[in-house]
Amino acid sequence: MSKMKWDESLSIGVELIDEQHQNWIERLGNVQSAIEDHRGMPHVANALDFLVDYTQFHFSTEEKYMSETGYPGLEDHRAKHEELKATLDDLVEDFRDYGVTEKLSRAIGTFLGNWLRDHIRVVDQAFAAFLKEKKIRLT
């Protein structure tokens, strides 16, 4: 499974959010490594739980700033976050029920990476454009 790597095409130009995206990609890579290296259920579980927790933290941060800045796309953005959180919950449940399966490996390696890449390049870029237009700088 190929690991997603951060590159400048994923930058939205908002330092705080870019840093969190970099961390999210790193955590996704940790789950992939735990699976690929056959580190065992506890290591995969820890890495997956960490990814889930970090996803919640990151989404809360984005939504907080969207709310504070009056971003008109907040509800649509939040709905996309909720869809991914539900998918992550399903992956965790599958992992707990069946362990490391090919489906889990594919979902981690392909689906989550593609989702994040697409989300950053389209949905998060729209928020960044809003901030730029309104001359709002997040700190």
Image (cartoon, rainbow, N blue to C red):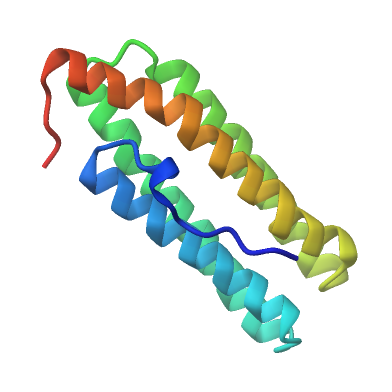
Task: Give left or right: position of 10 versus 37.
Answer: left
User: Residue at position x 26%, y 37% from top?
Assistant: 13
User: Residue at position x 62%, y 50% from top?
Assistant: 113
Indicate whether 52 appears above or below 48.
Answer: above
Q: Quadrant of the N terminus?
A: bottom right
Spot occupied by residue 44 in the image (x, y as percentages of width and height): 66, 77
Spot occupied by residue 54 in the image (x, y as percentages of width and height): 43, 58
Indicate whether 84 appears above or below 55.
Answer: above
Spot occupied by residue 110 in the image (x, y as percentages of width and height): 73, 52
Indicate whether 130 appears above or below 62.
Answer: above
Indicate whether 109 appears above or below 99.
Answer: above
* Outermost residue toward the bottom in this view: 39
Spot occupied by residue 90 in the image (x, y as percentages of width and height): 74, 50
Q: Nearer the viewer, residue 80 or 111?
A: 111
* Outermost residue toward the top in this view: 72
Q: Nearer the viewer, residue 31 or 11?
A: 11
Task: Give left or right: position of 34 versus 75.
Answer: right
Q: Quadrant of the C terminus?
A: top left
Q: Nearer the viewer, residue 37 or 99?
A: 37
**Number of numbered tags placed on the structure image:** 0
User: Residue at position x 71%, y 59% from top?
Assistant: 109
Q: Place residue 64 in its image quadrant.
A: top left
Task: Give left or right: position of 4 versus 27.
Answer: right
Task: Give left or right: position of 10 versus 97.
Answer: left
